[in-house]
Amino acid sequence: MAKQRINLALQGGGAHGAFAWGVLDRLLDEPEIEISGISGTSAGALNGAALAAGLACGPGARGRQAARENLAYIWSEVGEVSDNSVVRWLHSMFPIPRAWQRLTEIFSPVAWLETLTRVISPYDSGPFYSNPLSAILREMPHPQLGRSEGPAFFVSATNVRTGLIRVFGGAEVTVDTILASACLPELFRAVEIDDPKTGRREAYWDGGYSGNPALFPLYRPDLPRDIVIVNINPMLRDAIPKTPSAIQDRVNEISFNSSLLAELRAINFVKRLHAEDRLTGRPMKNVLLHAIMDEELMNSLSASTKLIPKPGLLESMRAAGKAAADHFLETGAKDIGLRDSYDISQLFR
């Protein structure tokens, strides 16, 4: 069977990124699918780094196995960092009725964390500060980043000074650029990286503010037309948020989806121009879009599980990701190279 070349666009979303782990694990089972390009942001950058570094280790089964090992290592370590004994203690000692759930939100570890980040800065820790993701990335089984072998890999971060996106690619992709892409400023200090274009040492925050994920790096002529977006932030929520935490959760979702929606709107416009044959002679790529998502699952979760996942959440998210990838392979993979399997026009009616 002929190779099906695709690009992957990996969203960020904290611990919910384990959903993409399951998606990637399943796609790696398909030798006829060739991952040519990856764009990742925040947790998507972590997943992309594990995948790209693994696939760079060699062609075929060797690279795929290395990628699996990297992904399993990343998420086992993230689980240990995120695991919180206070959460386990509360859940085991005080089973909470549904009617009391809102009250417990006020006193939950996540609520404490949100309160603390309003009065305490990551810069207050002085010389004792460390970013736990740094050691995780450096100790991956196959840690080589920025190699020319394997898929093209792009990482997005937000320039603190300008508010603009910066996309790192090729040899620019390092542990620091991944840390920059995943730098929530309430939790981590800004990551400083030299910018040869400005001649300055710039500070960067989470890429989700400006590109979650950025699609435009995948428009390169040498990359395939097909972009598979792995969504971990729900696009639609039918229920109106009414509690303070639910309102804040939805505000965050809308904020972190806004840049992706802007790019999808632009793609939708270009598709209309192509359909009307109004781009004759203009070098504008008509990309084919696909999506792997589970909106029902993501609607059932809150932002609290992004920061402090409950026991077993990562494995359940991985299983859900595998199931969603299975569904895509059964229903959407046949469209690769031919047509869109994700109708984005429905988003802009």
Image (cartoon, grey):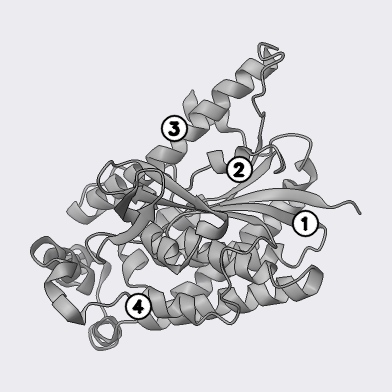
Among numbered discs 2 and 1, the one appearing first in the sequence: 1
Q: Secondary structure at mark 2?
A: helix
**Which residue is tagged 4?**
132
Mark 2: which amino acid? Leu
| Residue with the mark numbered 1 | 33
- Place of residue 275 in the rendered image (x, y in percent of width and height, measured from the top left): 69, 17
Q: Is residue 237 visible?
A: no
Which label sits in the foreground, 2 or 3? Answer: 2
Extreme-left residue of the structure? 119
Marker disc for residue 262: 3
Which mark sits nearer the N-terminus, 3 or 1? 1
In the image, 16: left or right of 215?
Answer: left
Mark 3 or 4, which is nearer the eye?
4
On residue 218, the disc is: 2
Q: What SS does tag 4 mark?
A: helix
Q: Is residue 75 left or right of residue 183?
A: right
- Single out the mark in the foreground, 1 or 4: 4
The part of the image, by quadrant, that contains residue 118 is bottom left
